[in-house]
Image (cartoon, rainbow, N blue to C red):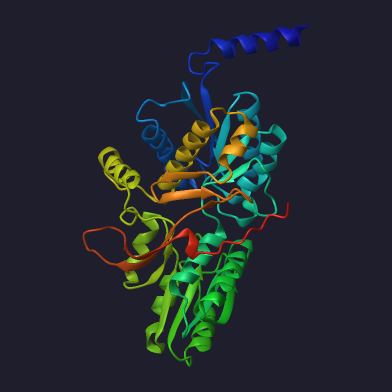
Amino acid sequence: MRRSLILTAAILGLAASPSAQADDLKIALIYGKTGPLEAYAKQTETGLKMGFEYATKGTMTLDGRKIVIITKDDQGKPDLAKAALAEAYQDDKADIAIGTTSSAAALAILPVAEENKKILIVEPAVADQITGEKWNRYIFRTGRNSSQDAISNAVAIGKQGVTVATLAQDYAFGRDGVAAFKEALAKTGATLAAEEYAPTSTTDFTAVGQRLFDALKDKPGRKVIWVIWAGAGNPLAKLQDMDPKRYGIELSTGGNILPALAAYKGLPGMEGATYYFYEIPKNPVNDWLVAEHQKRFNAPPDFFTAGGFAAAMSVVAAVTKAKSTDSEKLITAMEGLEFDTPKGKMVFRKEDHQALQSMYHFKVKVDPNVAWAVLEPVRELKIEDMDVPIKNKR
């Protein structure tokens, strides 16, 4: 009896809450607001709020309902992420959830969406498994996946007469990235000469660098070392210090957030492919985002600001098309859905709900008046330029 009174009081308390009315459209954002990926998470939140503002023309209402964003910090921890998403769906009655920052935490919450039969839009976690073997039909992803990163880089630097060697961290992120890169590189006519994997804690790259130089130095034509690395260690700078140019060897890697691009200033002329750089996409959505972000924060938007914005745009497009937040109606509406983002058009692929999207082949330019390296566009790598594999098994 006492338990039922407590439950009744809790329900009445929720109903009386001025911040969450029964007819509000509740969006839960699960993210690593504290912890190692804090910078990414904060960008996602800013982008999400600005995206809803843009998509609703400032009304923050959708389908006649007020949009309420419920934020939950998972600290990048899988167990906390699972608890946060379950709470969002069950206690907060979230209609749709977005998140999370860490790939490990994102993989942990995929079954929670399926158990609750609720939509989860993954942003910005990149692990291929999210829309691969760990996927379920309630999962959609606006963020790019590891394969899109790797394939775009292969397309950017690969062509007949080019020889490439790779350096990656010796765990799933690095090995999966290289596997996708190799497959895409083979289709460009380029040759892969060597693969090197180093522990994530590596700080001395002398031996691995020399092996890479030895694998490439006598090859004809253009020679490139492509690096896929996350976190500390800075192998690019260490390899650059070893003077690869004496062998005619270039370095290459993908894009990154603006603070990390400061290190790219030591690599003028380097080429690679990136998910986003604020000056590259030319469309009304990005024009608004760049101008408004500069005005509000005295800084341009970054990688994950664009990602959060894209997630908001997908929600508005989906609910508008479905005229509902019912999960089954949303799934029907979202499969094959095209929606605008700061990067231009994205499309949720029907088979695995991965957002197909443009990436950008860049060349590093150093501007002494800018704190980070400027990524000058070489060409837009469009959806049709990248053969992104379908990896789910269902």
Residue at image coords 48%, 91%: 219
Residue drawn at (62%, 43%) of the image = 139
**Residue 4, visible in the rendered structure:** yes
Which of 343 and 124 lies nearest the eye of the viewer? 343
Closest to the observer, 387 or 71: 387
Q: Is residue 129 above or below residue 95?
A: below
Which residue corresponds to the image point at 52% horizontal and 13% vertical from the top-left?
17
Q: Is residue 72 left or right of residue 276?
A: right
Decide: is 388 above or below 305: below
Which residue is more in the foreground, 204 or 342? 342
Give how far across and how far down residue 247 sits, in percent: 41, 88
| Residue closest to the eye, 389 or 240 | 389
Image location (x, y in percent) of residue 157? 44, 74
How many callouts does the rendering have? 0
Q: Residue furthest left?
A: 369
Q: Is residue 229 visible?
A: no
Q: Quadrant of residue 388?
A: bottom right
Can you give x and y, in whole percent of width and height, for residue 30 in the image?
55, 37
Left or right of 187 on screen, residue 292? left
Query: Picture coordinates of residue 260 (x, y %)?
Result: 40, 58
